[in-house]
Image (tube, rainbow, N blue to C red):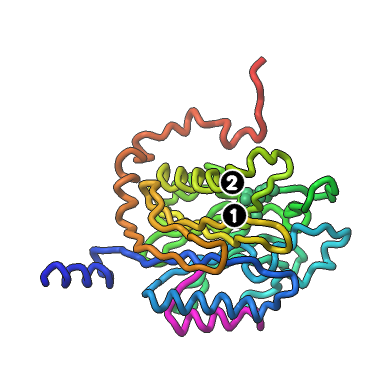
Amino acid sequence: MFGAIIGMWLYHGDMTSRIVRVGAAQLGPIAKDETREAVVERLIALLHQAADRGVQLVVFPELAFTTFFPRWYTDDVSGHDHYYETEMPGPETKPLFDEAKTLGIGFSIGYAELTPEGERYNTTILVERDGSVVGRYRKVHIPGHENDEPWRTFQHLERRYFQESDEGFPVWRAFDGIVGMATCNDRRWPETYREMGLQGVEIIMIGYNTPIHYAPDPGQNPLQGFHNHLCMQAGAYQNGTWVIGVAKGGVEEGVESLAQSAIIAPSGQIVAQAVTTGDELIIADADLDLCANYKDTLFDFDTYRRPEVYGRITGQKGVQLPD
Ligand code: CDT
């Protein structure tokens, strides 16, 4: 009885416990002709599942309102403006924001952003449980290519449709902790996690669209799932942070993308993983105080890091071979 009371006390959270119930809301494919309204209905259905399970923070994937349009080449990118959001929320996306606020659930979601200045970013917005916007992250590491490469069975033209953000990896105090975001390809780069680790991050939210077929080296295809978890688990462990990796998976417009969304503890262990390639919510109770077990011991940066010998990491871009 006493144990049950303590358990409920911890579950509901107070000054001494920081347990956030988090959800990874994986999406299945979004067809080219699927309307924003239809997609938002799917997102809201996942929000309702989250509410039923007491989730406080839901993470949706990268570019979650549309099909992954960078797979198609166009001479004139402005001809694809309908895939971009000029305001967030806008008229078609606002029902998601309204429903989340009504349910008292915070969320992050990725979208294509077109600014009033005509800049195009692969952006993620983070919203608190009261509906206030916590912050916005613009993708730093833009993968793929810029020009048509017809030899590929499909294109990965993110470098045509989006510019690289120079805003880096900010973190915010929200959800009873310190939180940050990254987007898809960012998760493969250790600098992503370390930049946020150096700001004390405790939850990193990552949405992704990862085609199984990697045209420049198809030998990597069978390793997509391994590499996905490898980099996120390493990033979590080496920085003592929770990582929530969320896919848009399944076969979309003929292209198969990785699912395997995962919630990863600061130990690097996967505590929840999606089992389908469609719309699916997985949840975990993220104890943010677990982060300190790693941040204050093996990865006590203040004691053990040696930035004075890491000059190449920021001073140099490509490889410089020895003479
Ligand atoms: N969306 C995204 O960043 N996808 C990349 C694919 C890389 S292959 C061109 C990823 O890293 O998963």
Q: Dot 1 corresponds to which residue? A: 258
Range of residues picked out in magenta: 90-107
Point 68% across, 65% down: residue: 112
Q: Which residue is at the front of the view, 76 or 250?
A: 250
Residue 237 on image: x %, y %: 40, 44
Up-down: is 294 above or below 275? above
Residue 150 on image: x %, y %: 85, 49
In space, the residues marked 1 and 2 are separated at their CA atoms by 7 Å
Point 31% across, 50% down: residue: 292
| Magenta region includes residue 96 | yes
Q: Is residue 14 left or right of residue 170?
A: left
Q: Which mark is residue 224?
A: 2
Q: Is residue 102 left or right of residue 91?
A: left
Residue 106 on image: x %, y %: 46, 72
Q: In the structure shown, which secondary structural element does the residue marked by tag 2 occupy?
A: helix
Q: Which residue is at the front of the view, 37 or 220?
A: 220
Q: Would residue 6 be visible to someone looking at this image?
A: yes
Point 70% across, 66% down: residue: 67
Q: Which mark is residue 143?
A: none
Up-down: is 218 above or below 306? below
Crowding around mark 1 (Cα neighbors within 10 Å: few <14, some 14 to 19, many 20+) is many
Indicate the quadrant containing the N terminus: top left, top right, bottom left or bottom right: bottom left
Ligand 1 lies under 8 Å from the Cβ of mark 1: yes
Residue at the farthest top position: 323
Residue 88 on image: x %, y %: 63, 74
Point 58% across, 83% down: residue: 95
